[in-house]
Image (spheres, rainbow, N blue to C red):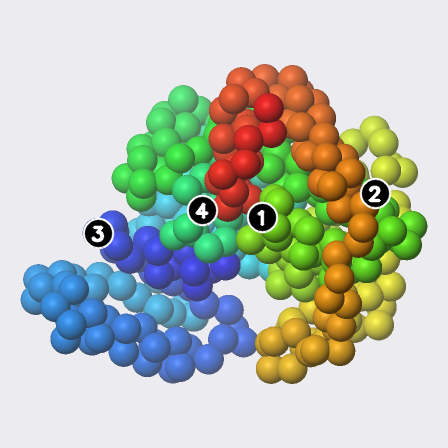
Amino acid sequence: MGTNLFYYLLEFGFSIVWLCSENADLEKLQKTYLKKIKRLFDAGVIDNDRNEFLLKNILLTKEINNLIACDLIIEAITENLEHKKNLFSILDPLVLPHCIFTSNSSSINPSEMCPSVMRQDKFAGLHFFYPVSLKNIAELIITDAVSEETQRRLVEFLTAIERDHILLKEDSSFILNRIFLDLQNDAFRIVSAGEFTIYQMDVLIKKHFSPSGVFEFCDNVGNDIMLESVNNYKRNDNDNKTYLPFIRKLEMLVHEKKLGIKTGEGFYVYDNGTQNSNSIREENAAENHQETVKHLHSVIRNSLIKWSDRGKIPLLNLNNAMKEYLGSEKDFF
């Protein structure tokens, strides 16, 4: 996600420092970046001035001190609370006081990561969706401590990078993921009941709701990341039983190191990142697919109503945001 966000932001004239992880192959990342810029220049997509700017004002580094002069930091590391808190604690005394801290976390609230009282008014969630260039929606998550100035600057930033957004408080944070989780959870329940296979369900989802199946989605994100995210959502909800069977399945996959594409197996088996044909042998859709489509449509609709009320977001706005999130033209009302 960090890589995807970096290349998207290149289009908007910012000076950017990309702080790469200690395990990253920095030389390879730099070569890839320079190759892409050269290709754009040689093809006439960017002119000489733009080429010079991108060579002089973009830095890929492993040295955290290079972030000292930043006005905005967008954290996009692994979905682990302690890792995120540790990073922000290191950054807090290092960068300038006016710098805004944001996290691209998909399941951890900003108040849980904020490193100090002095940074509370300049700390928010800025949750983008993959791929950033194709998903014209972001979630701006604010705490009660966030200042109007910080909120204004973040909205101006989102406008500058041509992304729509929905404004959320922490009690309705990650609202689009939560609505999608209701769809995933019910799809898993139907599969577990033997009414559909995993493959048949994903075919149905892709035909009627989204370009990606719900189980393909898990394997792409990583079942370990999915498990952490669902557990984080569960911590902040009163109902701890709704997602329990789905959580148990994710726990089993993680225990067996079936994390998805990155390990070669998850809900599906993969050969070099492509689904193995043995994973998708079922060609015929289940006979009751029309009733299942209606049911899953109602699951999304009911979830939209619930979260619209909880988040105090106009239902039409949330419906449109969910369509953008799913990559679908389908209305749910």
Mark 1, secondary structure of its residue = loop
- Of tags 1 and 3, the one toward the viewer is 1
* Mark nearer the N terminus (1 vs 3): 3
Kindly identify which numbered label has been placed on residue 13: 3
Q: Is residue 315 above or below residue 279?
A: above
Give how far apart the Cα atoms at labels 4 and 1 are: 13 Å
Q: Amino acid at mark 1?
A: Ser
Q: Which residue is drawn at the image coordinates 50% and 46% (left, top)?
A: 327
Type of the residue with mark 4: Lys
Going from the N terminus, do you reach mark 4 or mark 1 first? 4
For label 4, the crowd category at 10 Å Cα-Cα, with few meaning under 14, some 14 to 19 and many 20 or more, is some
- How far is mark 4 from mark 2, CA to CA? 26 Å
Q: Which disc number belongs to residue 210? A: 1
Q: Is residue 183 above or below residue 5?
A: above
Q: Nearer the viewer, mark 4 or mark 3?
A: 4
What amino acid is found at the position of numbered circle 3 in the picture?
Gly
- Coordinates of residue 126 in the picture (x, y in percent): 48, 41
What count of labels does the image hold? 4
Secondary element under disc 2, as helix, strand or loop, is loop
